[in-house]
Amino acid sequence: MRIARVSGWIVVLMCASAMVAAAQISHPGGERPGTVHVELEDATEKSPITPGPSAPVHELLGERLLDANRPADALKEFEVNLTKEPNRFRMSDGAGHPAEFAEDRVTRFAQSPQYPLLPRELEIELALSAAPKHLRSEATVWTLDQTGYKVAKQGTNAFSCIVSRRAGDLFPVCWDAEGARSLLPLDFDDAQMRLAGKPGTEIEAVVAQRFKSGNYHPPARAGIAYMLSPMRYRIDEHGVVSRTASNPHLMFYGPNLTDTDIGGARGAFVFINRVGPDGMMIVPVGEKEREAIVSDAQSLIAQVEQAIGYQPSR
């Protein structure tokens, strides 16, 4: 009976320890909150539950880290648990590998790892970061949900901001009225085609055909689009996220122009990003302006990279 009572108290203490660890996940102080409770379990030579394990603290902590959108930290906990108990790892959806499980917890659009869904307020802030500050408060913002792009904030000026995700190229851009009329629909239609199950290569072919047939039109007058955010990411078909070099810049419509037409070259004051009906003349901002933009964006960068699961190479 005495042994049974001791075992019962161990159960209570370890469960309480796991609950405290979970509660500390969002605590602002410290890199790995809750680890003191994990260390307590690691110091024991027996399973936390008598006669056999039920939910080791590493596993519980990993699941709470996933809920807190910290897949990298969660993966570390799952890997420790797999080392200690290789046949123990519990998966709520039946998946068999912690990395895949962590990846699956990033909410996706159309079941595509290339189209992560962001928290609404975070996506609004990211979209607006493409525009100069004096335009942001009155710009219209589109955000992506499970059914496609929707207006999240109705503006009063001529600009429309969006976080584009076409073919896993994630970046914010803010269009003037002409760009919103002629080029913004490409993002809307891309999302709907992806929702219908079309692969990226087929979507590219559809876009080219629609320009050719006249369903899409290049900008009909001079105008500007802003990409002043320092953030751009490439997400491959497996959901692996990498940073893409993105110097904040202005874009002036240049349908079917070439660098030869404008005297442009990569690294120069101006160049053409691509030759075609949606081609742009790219004008990078100056070095001082770029430094100020990057400095101001540090908090937003950290939030976005956490949300999309970006892990810097070590």
Image (spheres, helix red, strand yellow):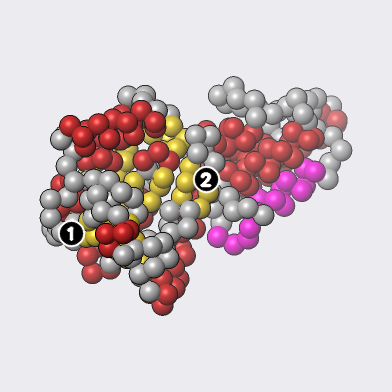
Which amino acid is tagged 1?
Answer: Gly
| Label placed on residue 223 | 1
Q: Is residue 128 left or right of residue 116?
A: left
Name the residue: 56% across, 47% down: 70
Name the residue: 47% across, 65% down: 298
| Residue 239 pos. (x, y %) | 51, 38
Q: Which residue is mark 2?
A: 241
Q: Is residue 149 left or right of residue 267?
A: left
Q: Any magenta on residue 38?
A: yes
Read off the magenta span: 28-42
| Label placed on residue 103 | none
- Compare residues 41 and 300 and report the one nearer the observer: 300
Name the residue: 68% across, 37% down: 78
- Up-down: is 24 above or below 239? below
- Label 2: state its secondary structure: strand
Count neighbours of disc 2 (C-alpha within 10 A) and say few if under 14, some if 14 to 19, many if 20 or more: many
- Compare residues 120 and 268 and report the one nearer the observer: 268
| Residue 91 pos. (x, y %) | 61, 27
Question: In the rendered view of the protein, which quadrant contains the N terminus?
Answer: top right
Q: Quadrant of residue 5?
A: top right
Sequence-wise first label, 1 or 2? 1
- Up-down: is 224 above or below 96? below
Q: Nearer the viewer, mark 1 or mark 2?
A: 1
Which amino acid is tagged 2?
Answer: Val
Question: In the rendered view of the protein, which quadrant contains the C terminus?
Answer: bottom right
| Residue 270 pos. (x, y %) | 33, 65
